[in-house]
Image (cartoon, rainbow, N blue to C red):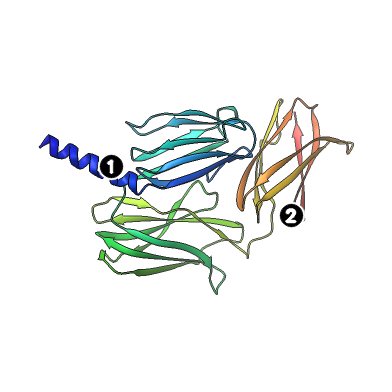
Amino acid sequence: MKKHLLTCTVACFSLLLANAETKIVEVKNFQFKPAVTNAVVGDVIQFVWKSGGHTATSTSVPAGAATWDAIVDEGHQVFEYTLTTTGTYEYWCTPHKPDMAGTLIVTGAMPVVLAYLNVNTSASKKALLSWKTISEQNTASFIIKRSTDGNNFTEIARINAAGNSNIEKSYSYTDNTISNSSKYYYYMLQIADKDDRFTLSDIKLFRNYSAVPKLITSLSPNPISKPGHLQLQFNADKTGTMQVKLFDSNGKLTKQTEMSADIGLNNGHFHLGNIPAGVYTIVFTMDGIKETKSIVVQ
């Protein structure tokens, strides 16, 4: 009996490895992109360096999973980690913790083949989700989850699944509750079966064309203490760089930097150092958009 169970375990894990995917997490600009990665046991997470000097260091892993602490910089451009256990994995960059952090959500493989998940603008300018399954077995529902920051997701709807099917099935849902205060929304499917197991789709980005144009969405802390480390979030309509310039109260350029950007909501980290106390102006410029913010250094 024990030999039979061992054989089944080895065979199942071998099947998972055979169907494994490589998930890319880019390490740059004081952020992991994507910040949340959905995967299944057997997948490989590949941390790929893009800029700066960072680490990918686990802070919490499921029981039985291996921890990791890897340098990710110009001399160590790729680090791979194979997922062997279901659960939630938390990690961060040690020099830039706790703001530069990421999450892996790992489930077991389920007998559902998802052909695609698309999120497009509907005729009503709302988010239209459409997806198709090639086959389903014992499926109960598709739980639609939404986020405005790509990190924190909440359930907004449930769609009944076919249950058992060997033919293609198409589904759709229109999100009529998006707000013009958020330029980007992130969506994913939680595919649940009748035995309360679930797996997750990849995360898809939706651009809200009705949103009020905005480059900088948050700056903190403000006032800021010395040595200064300013955290910010900013929107980007395309991949590129944002120019950041700091001016003192006399209009003198004090510091400047560039922050790489991906489409969607981005995180940034501006090292101010031990600059004198006072009121400063920061000018942000990207893709023809310029915004000015004031900060106080104590």
Residue 201 on image: x %, y % = 41, 54
Which residue is located at x 89 percent, y 36 percent? 250
Callout 1: 10 Å neighbours few (<14), some, many (20+)?
Answer: some
Which residue is located at x 79 percent, y 28 percent? 277
Most distant residue in the bottom direction: 123
Q: Amino acid at mark 2?
A: Asp
Say above or below: 167 vs 71.
Answer: below
Camera-nearest residue between 228 and 161: 161
Residue placed under numbered mark 1 in the picture: 13
Q: Earlier in the sequence, mark 2 or mark 1?
A: 1
Residue 271 on image: x %, y % = 71, 32
Question: In screen coordinates, is 257 left or right of 164?
Answer: right
Which residue is located at x 53 percent, y 66 percent? 120
Callout 2: 10 Å neighbours few (<14), some, many (20+)?
Answer: some
Residue placed under numbered mark 2 in the picture: 287
Q: Amino acid at mark 1?
A: Phe
